[in-house]
Amino acid sequence: MNFSREIFIKRKIGSRKTGECDKRNALGGGSSSPPSNRAGIPISNPVPHTTLQFPLTENIFPYPFAPPMKKISRILTFTFLCLVGILVVLVTTIYTLSSARMNKTYEVKSVPIPKFSKSIDIAEGKRLYQSRGCGDCHDVDGSGRTFIEDPALGTLSGVNLTSGKGGILSDRTDEELAIAIRHGVGKEGRALLFMPSTDFQGMTNEDVGKLIAFLRSSPAVDKPQGELKAGPLGRFLFLIGEIPVFVSAEKINHEANHLTNITPSVSLEYGKYVASTCTGCHGFSLKGGPIQGAPPEWPPAQDISKSGLTNYTESTFIQTIRTGKRPDGSEMKFPMPWQSLGQLTDTELKALWIYLQTI
Ligand code: HEC
Ligand code: HEC
């Protein structure tokens, strides 16, 4: 009785050991559970030592512990091709979407523009040209210049606005020029690129007339049109709404009526009129921030509303715009165009100060 019990227990232990061995066999692709020796390794059906020797001395798994070079290069090539594919699709989408908006045409009602020929009006036209920053992109002589050259943003050049070879003046009526300046729309309704008409849309008929009289009186300059090409980053920023002047025609209400004239005076209304010159860089709210569409090395424009100009008085404000030096003696950096804005009259600057103090 006792004896048979011992045998029973032995059998039990033996079979448990065999069970452990089964697991190992399963790992090594082994078979059923034959009787085992003390170490638990089956005797009747030994499994090849390569799969059962612990710790493992050979790498029995081909991947991922020791991937062969061929496989790595295949994976890298595949990943690279996938990335190139994604990039091509992305760039194509950016170009297609942006071109669709850039090639849109606009119909703008023509408004009669008053003609000026007196030298005093032409001189005022010249002052407007200089103080509104036209020369920053169309050059002082109106012949056009490249003002941004960046492979990612694009190469942007102002048009030759004279009647010389390569210039557009002889081929435009005053009304067409006025539409280009105030609506950002060129001949046959073409949307102009990077012409910041959002800054000039409020210009009165008389001021535009004087500006055009100045252009017509300027000497012809022969100069071919510089490159005007939007880069991939420029187009992308345009698509996500970061560069409103990219196609300023999109942002302008083409139905709005234009004022015929506004009398210069030290008033809030006139200050607001002049302040539109500052919105292209200081933003529509004039609260400053990074200049949209500018190359990364340009500093952000500063807050010129009341909260930003706490260190200024009317006279130091005027002095700063005229000299480029702030009350603390520091210089205002490029692209703050103080050389052109210095051409603003005392009346314009005083009115501007009044307006800026209200916002
Ligand atoms: C930020 C640069 C910039 C400033 C500032 C600027 N322009 Fe332009 N302007 C351009 C560019 C770029 C074009 C060409 C757009 C195109 O052809 O798609 C252009 C086009 C024009 C055209 C249309 C030419 C045509 O083909 O019919 C006129 C007119 C013009 N500008 C006048 C002015 C006047 C006047 C001012 C100042 C009140 C001014 N621009 C200020 C960049 C500028
Ligand atoms: C072409 C872009 C551009 C235009 C247009 C422009 N600004 Fe600026 N402005 C700047 C930038 C950039 C700075 C910052 C310069 C710096 O960091 O030194 C600046 C700085 C200033 C400052 C100094 C602010 C301070 O905190 O000290 C004043 C004042 C100012 N602008 C006034 C004006 C006014 C007024 C107009 C319109 C009549 C105007 N700006 C138009 C780009 C511009």
Image (cartoon, rainbow, N blue to C red):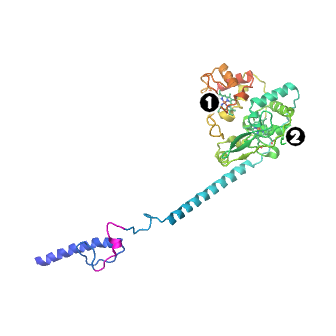
In magenta stretch: residue 143: no
User: In what element is the residue under mark 1?
Assistant: loop
Q: Amino acid at mark 1?
A: Asp
Q: Is mark 1 within 8 Å of ligand 2?
A: yes
Quarter of the render that holds ligand 1: top right
In magenta stretch: residue 53: yes
Kindly identify which residue carries mark 1: 303
* Residue drawn at x 66%, y 49% as measured from the top left: 232
* Residue drawn at x 44%, y 68% as measured from the top left: 62
Q: Main secondary structure of the magenta part?
A: loop
Q: Is residue 81 left or right of residue 14?
A: right
The stretch of residues the image draws in magenta is 44-57
Above or below: residue 122 compared with residue 180 = above
* Residue drawn at x 64%, y 42% as measured from the top left: 242
Q: Is residue 283 left or right of residue 255?
A: left
User: In what element is the residue under mark 2?
Assistant: helix
Kindly identify which residue carries mark 2: 170
| CA–CA distance in space, label 1 to label 2 | 41 Å
* Residue drawn at x 78%, y 29% as measured from the top left: 128
Measured as percent of width and height from the top left, residue 13 is found at 21, 72
Mark nearer the viewer, 1 or 2: 2
